[in-house]
């Protein structure tokens, strides 16, 4: 699959506020400053973007910029969803609670969510807030994959050490680890592998939906 067309489809703060057309959704989430918007822009680089600016997702040096659920229509057939994320320290407790509500409602109730990509900063070992979030996904049966971001920043030895550490920690909770990818928005690392996985997920999701519709007839 190639991402040939990408367009901003709308922002919302509730599940009911999503774009009216129901299509499969692939969502991205991560801690503050993990490089989520940069990764989304990298994955959609080269696509025809029907947006006012050059970038699809807004990037900022200030953490916590995404404060709504942003849908991007990809190839006129599915949505890439930019979620607010978690772990923002420099916002009020009230706003943190509101962002958590948005994420929990979307992740827990969207019938169109095909999978969730959880982004982890490859410069660090697994943080407790990430472990708590990932563990909750497992308990709720939410399909997810992991993407290590900013792989161009640490030294190769440090990168390998951090990734191995995360895998070891997660292995204490899962017999089989979720799909794991390594990326760099600056170098384009991981783009083909991630998009290929997206294609597989979308195909499986569509097949499952068709089977469900057939069973309901």
Image (cartoon, helix red, strand yellow):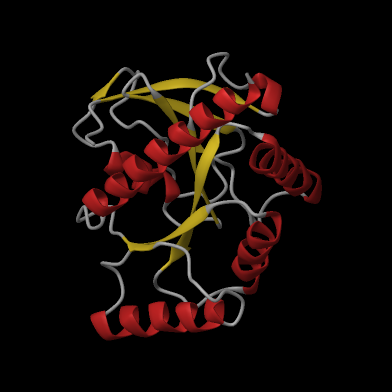
132 with respect to 158 (left or right): right
Q: State the residue at coordinates (53%, 80%).
A: 171
Quadrant the N terminus occupies? top left
Where residue 39 appears, x then y in whole percent?
Answer: 35, 48
Q: State the residue at coordinates (21%, 52%).
A: 188
Q: Nearer the viewer, residue 55 or 78?
A: 78
Q: Residue furthest right?
A: 94
Q: Nearer the viewer, residue 110 or 83?
A: 110
Image height check: is 57 above or below 190?
above
122 with respect to 193 (left or right): right
Image height check: is 64 above or below 148?
above
- Image quadrant where residue 95 sits: top right
Q: State the residue at coordinates (46%, 78%).
A: 167
Q: Residue furthest top?
A: 20
Quadrant the C terminus occupies? top right
196 with respect to 214 (left or right): left
Is residue 214 visible to the viewer in this orientation of the structure?
Answer: yes
The total of numbered circles placed on residues is: 0
């Amino acid at each position: 699959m190639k991402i040939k067309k990408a367009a901003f489809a709308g922002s919302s703060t509730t599940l009911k506020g999503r774009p009216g057309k129901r299509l499969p959704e692939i969502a991205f989430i991560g801690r503050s400053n993990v490089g989520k918007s940069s990764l989304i822009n990298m994955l959609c680089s080269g696509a025809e973007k029907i947006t006012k600016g050059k970038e699809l997702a807004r990037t900022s040096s200030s953490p916590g910029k995404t404060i709504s659920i942003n849908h991007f229509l990809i190839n006129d057939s599915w949505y890439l969803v930019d979620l607010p994320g978690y772990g923002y320290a420099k916002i009020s407790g009230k706003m943190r609670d509101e962002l958590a509500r948005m994420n929990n409602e979307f992740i827990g109730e969207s019938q169109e969510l095909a999978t969730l990509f959880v982004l982890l900063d490859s410069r660090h070992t697994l943080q407790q807030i990430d472990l708590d979030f990932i563990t909750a996904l497992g308990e709720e049966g939410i399909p997810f994959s992991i993407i290590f971001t900013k792989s161009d920043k640490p030294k190769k030895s440090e990168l390998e050490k951090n990734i191995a550490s995360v895998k070891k920690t997660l292995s204490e909770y899962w017999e089989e680890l979720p799909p794991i990818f390594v990326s760099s928005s600056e170098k384009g690392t991981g783009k083909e592998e991630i998009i290929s996985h997206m294609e597989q997920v979308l195909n499986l999701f569509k097949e499952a939906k068709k089977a469900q519709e057939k069973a309901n007839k």
